[in-house]
Image (cartoon, rainbow, N blue to C red):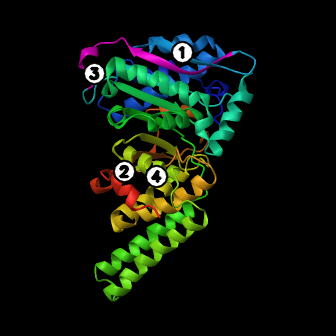
Amino acid sequence: MATPLMADPDGIDVTGLSHLVDPNWEDQTDRRCIAAVLVEVVYQHQINDKRVDQWSTLLPFKVKEEIIIKDEQGKSIVIGVIFGWVGRSKLASGCAGKPPSEVVAFRGTLWKSEFRWGDFCEDVNVALARMDSLSRVGMALKYLRRSIQRHGSHNIWIVGHSLGASIALAAVRNLSREEREKLEAHLFNPPFISPRLPELKFFEIVGRLLSTIRNGSLSLPFPRLEGIYKGIQGACDVVALRMGLQDDNRLLELYGEFIAVGNWIPNLYVNKKDLVCSTYIKYLEAWKGIYTHNSDLVHETMKHLFCFEVANKRTPWHMVPSAKLFVAITDNKHHSLCQWWLKDLQIQSIHDYVPPKKIIQWNANTVKTNLP
């Protein structure tokens, strides 16, 4: 899903990244650049690029282990790398502004590699939201849990680009709440493929309308307001009824997964001109509108969205209720990783999307009572 960075004429310019030799770990820009460079090293490991040694003079990390899967011909494919911190202040890691003990990094698609067909097949599964079928997700989860057992989630980063960002997202969603909450994530150009955005936008508009009515800005009797809300709820129930999902356990699972992941706030990096990931901007803005104007609609919104996902046997791995979103604009290379390790990259906007506590604290029983 991503053009390999080594196809770029620039590659990693070590001289241009001299600021990372002694990074400021409290600086979000330095953390972004370091995460991007480590993902690039994963690309280099797969294609055995001779420039892979350049990074060792740049950052105080070493390769501890490669994450490898086998293709249909039995050939080894490097999909990720675990990096270990070897610099100073290791014992102080885990605190704000300190380096991670380990970084679990995943690459995207290598179009100019002999393994491009396998990567492409995984891209198709991502587009179809069938991440459960990916062996890469299971392997990622295995190694991620090992790192967490060694150092604790507060000392681990998980990073990825494009397809690798999808793998990271899917793996983290499968972690327990305790393992996930303090895990720092830097995900570059994460794909967002969903036909349900118009419906999500509809619920945001309805939420704004109900909020306006409740605030007294519009003259409308309260019984009519209740009628509007019940009408929306009834419409969602009808959709679920027709699709035969009233008692579907999978729908309940999706509710629980979506709510449980609410306390985890990944750093998502998207380019506004990148068609693969830019939908995250509208998606998170829509959720923010629902949270802000009428949080009572959250259950109805999830019910509507997830019914379609279940009916089509899709797993909405890309749908997260919380995120810190970094939006960049560049003239070219919109989906390329190289933009993200530039210190002078122009970040157009930074948004924090965090749902109210009453939403992320809903338990499974609360969710079950709201099923159609």
165 horizontally vs 180: left or right: right
Discs 4, 2 touching: Cβ within 8 Å: yes
Which residue occupies 28% across, 15% down? Answer: 90
Please say if 85 is above or below 345: above
Pointer 1 residue: 66
Label 4 crowd bin: few (<14), some (14–19), many (20+), radius 10 Å: many
Residue 59 seen in the figure: no
Q: Residue 364's mark?
A: 2
Please say if 317 is above or below 281: above
Q: Is residue 79 magenta?
A: yes
Snapshot quadrant of residue 124? top right
Residue 25: x and y, percent? 31, 27
Q: Earlier in the sequence, mark 2 or mark 1?
A: 1
Label 3 crowd bin: few (<14), some (14–19), many (20+), radius 10 Å: some
Which residue occupies 34% across, 56% down? Answer: 366
Pointer 3 residue: 93
Q: Earlier in the sequence, mark 4 or mark 3?
A: 3
Q: What amino acid type should be assigned to the residue bearing mark 3?
A: Ser
Rounded to the nearest angstrom, the CA distance separating label 4 from label 1 is 36 Å
Which residue occupies 47% across, 21% down? Answer: 143
> Judging from the image, what secondary structure is the residue with disc 4 in?
helix
Q: Which stretch is magenta?
A: 76-94
> Judging from the image, what secondary structure is the residue with disc 2 in?
helix
Q: Earlier in the sequence, mark 3 or mark 1?
A: 1
Q: What amino acid type should be assigned to the residue bearing mark 1?
A: Glu
Pointer 4 residue: 252
